[in-house]
Image (cartoon, rainbow, N blue to C red):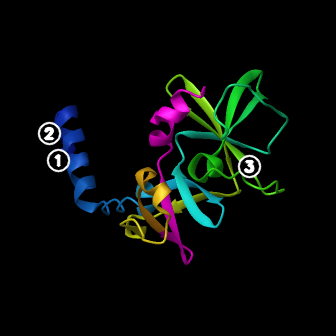
Amino acid sequence: MTESAALTPFELLESIAQRMRERVAPLPEEPSQAKDWKGIAFRLREWHLVAEQGLVREVFVPARITRVPGTHPWLIGVANIHGNALPVVDLADFFWGERLSDSASNRILLVRQDDRECGVLVSEVMGVYPFLPKDVSPVSHSFPAELGDYLSGCRHHEGNVWGEFSMQLLMESPGIIDLSL
C-alpha cells in the first residue's frame, strides 16, 4: 500500500503543501521603486522645485484668464477649466510681488485639496520624476527665504537639487484661502 492510500484527502493536501514550501524559492524582495516618491518637477524663475504628485491633478498651458477686480495682485484671474471657474495665482507674484514674464514654457498646475481648487502659474514643468529615499536631504540654503515656509526638504535628481514644495501648505495659506483684498 502506498503512502497516499493511507492518508486522508486533507492529509494528502497538507503533505503536498509542505513539500512545496520546502522546495520553493523565496519570493524576491519588493523592488525599491515601490518606495519611490513621485513628484511634479517644475521651475519657479531659476529655482527647481518638486511637489507631491497627489495634490497636483493636471498641468495646463495658460489659457484665456479673466481678471477679477478687488482681488490680490498675484491673483491673475479666473480661467475656464472643464467648465469650472478656476482661480489662477502667479506663484512668483505671490512670493516676490513681480509677475512671471510671458513665456511659452509657462504652465498652470491644477491643485486640488479637499473641496478647493486653484491654478498655480509656474515658469516651466519638467514632468513627473521618481525620487528614491536616498535622494532626500535637508532644505538647502540656496532657496530664497520667501519659499522657506513652503519647503519641507530637498531631493536630488540628475545633478539638481529640487526643493520639495508643499502645495498643501500653499492651499492652506491665508492668501490663497481668501483671494479678495
Question: In the rendered image, which residue does mark 1 sit on?
Answer: 3
Residue visible at 22% across and 33% down in the picture? 9
> Picture coordinates of residue 74 (x, y %)?
66, 41
Q: Is residue 1 visible?
A: no
Label 1: which secondary element: helix
Question: Magenta part of the protein: which range?
Answer: 156-181
Determine whether 22 is above or below 6 in the image: below
Mark nearer the viewer, 2 or 3: 3
Residue visible at 57% across and 75% down in the picture? 158
> Picture coordinates of residue 33 (x, y %)?
46, 60
The mark found on residue 107 in the picture is 3
Residue visible at 22% across and 59% down in the picture? 22
Mark 2 and mark 3 lie on one chain; the one further toward the N terminus is: 2
Label 3: which secondary element: strand
The local crowd at label 1, few if under 14, some if 14 to 19, many if 20 or more residues have their Cα within 10 Å, is few
Quadrant into which the N terminus falls:
top left
For this rendering, which residue is in front, 94 or 40? 94
Q: Report if residue 120 lies within the magenta region.
A: no
Compared across the picture, whether 101 is left or right of 45 comes to right
Residue type, numbered disc 1: Glu
> Picture coordinates of residue 119 (x, y %)?
66, 37
Residue type, numbered disc 3: Arg
Question: In the rendered image, which residue does mark 2 sit on?
Answer: 6
Label 2: which secondary element: helix
Determine whether 31 is above or below 87 in the image: below
Q: Report if residue 158 lies within the magenta region.
A: yes
* Label 2 with label 3: CB-CB less than 8 Å: no
* Label 2 with label 1: CB-CB less than 8 Å: yes
The local crowd at label 2, few if under 14, some if 14 to 19, many if 20 or more residues have their Cα within 10 Å, is few
